Image (cartoon, rainbow, N blue to C red):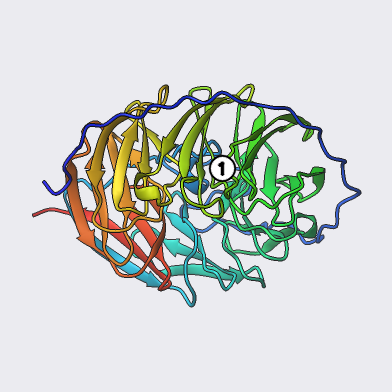
Amino acid sequence: MLFRPILGSVVAIILAGCAGASGVPSSSPDVSPSGPSASAPASGAPASGAPASGADVLTYRGDAARTGEMPGPGPAAKPQIRWTFQAGAPIGSQVAVVGQTIYLVSTDGQVHALDLATGTSRWSASTGAETHGSPTIADGLLIVGADDAAHAFGLADGRVAWRATQTGTVRGAPATVGHVAVFAGGDGTITALDTRSGTVLWQRSLGAPDNSSVAAADGVAILGLENGIVVALALADGHERWRTDTGDGARIGTPTIAGGRVFVPTLEGGGPGTRHILAMDLATGQLQWRFASPGDKPAYAPAIADGRAIVEGENGTVTALDPTTGKVIWQAAAPGLVEVVAASTGGVVYGASNGGFAFALDASSGLERWRIPIKGVPYGVAVAAGLVLVGTNLGTLDAIGGVAQ
């Protein structure tokens, strides 16, 4: 096996937490009036308002809590690239999957609907602006944040359903719960929209940019700011529940919520010794433990799998942490530098390395199950219907499936 687990431990428990004041709601919405398509849905795409199946990937990292849990299953036999789709620009996000249709967005703002089995195009549309956030499915619509606004398209044919400009520049995915989508703006403005109409429900200013994805669970939205601060807002009205300074002064990546805790990565901008994975109490924001990223290189938000918080990082390691203590359970060498967050399903963790490999390893032990060469720098991994789906900076989407030997 190419992955060799290494036992280790982490000590350092840091307790801190503070509260902050909420912002002021904004004025009335500015929403485009065009409505969702009433035409029949394409194969595998539900009509507007129809529930998605349990095998769907509806948002970045699989759910609004950003746990990395995917519906699966992954490839059942020897993995091979089944098909490759070529977009006209880098695919800087993770895809969504509903039924037999894949939805993806490239950085030039093109939105594509592809046949899951073959990768052939069903329709394409455009946000009209640079787009980096992963698509999210809610209320029968594909919702995505771009550099100019939040956009919603009909799943059946890509017709514009609504457009809301109040969000400003959005570089991450919104957290959607019920009929509410919470967007983080690059200007520090947090906006909650009604997923059905794009109407603004509430808006707050947090005083610093957030260019990552929002996480949400248990009635709160969690946001990681560019100045090392993590904030919890009530989903109902945007009231600030708590505000915690991590002490690193570094950009906070996408949070993960699981087991009554928030896990956040501190990335670049804080100087040497400030790159960590931190755990804090979901209810209070109190820091519980701090794990120093191996080699002082960025490591990314953990996937929660097999009772472990599994972290992939740029120093070329995959690390499984005890989510309650931060202690290392196992650590393994990845096949190259990894800048994507881990995805998990069925006791298996999936990842992809820069210009190297897509790979799978056992979540309980860290032992490698398989690896397959890929080209380009990957941005996100989704696992559904027997496929691992990886988009890259080359504009390619590789569908990796099992092929019987």
**Numbered circles on residues, count:** 1
Which residue is farthest front?
Answer: 272
Inspect this view and state whether residue 177 appears: no
* Residue 92 in picture, x, y percent from top left: 49, 63
Which residue is farthest right?
Answer: 27
Quarter holding residue 240:
top right
Label 1 amino acid? Asp
Q: Quick one: 49 or 298, which is closer to the camera?
A: 298
Q: Quick one: 24 or 137, which is closer to the camera?
A: 24
Residue drawn 52% across the image and 52% down it: 271
Inspect this view and state whether residue 135 appears: yes
* Residue 174 in picture, x, y percent from top left: 63, 47
Q: Quick one: 22 or 121, which is closer to the camera?
A: 22
The vertical placement of 101 against 364, above or below, is below
Image-based side of 310 in relation to 6, left or right = right
Residue drawn 66% across the image and 71% down it: 129
* Residue occupied by mark 1: 248
Q: Quick one: 308 or 45, which is closer to the camera?
A: 308
- Secondary structure beneath disc 1? loop
Quadrant of the drawing holding the C terminus? bottom left
| Label 1: how many Cα within 10 Å (few below 14, some 14–19, many 20+) | many
Image-based side of 276 in relation to 284, left or right = left
* Residue 331 in picture, x, y percent from top left: 26, 39
Which residue is farthest bottom?
Answer: 88
* Residue 284 in picture, x, y percent from top left: 64, 22
Image-based side of 123 in relation to 236, left or right = left
Quarter holding residue 124:
bottom right
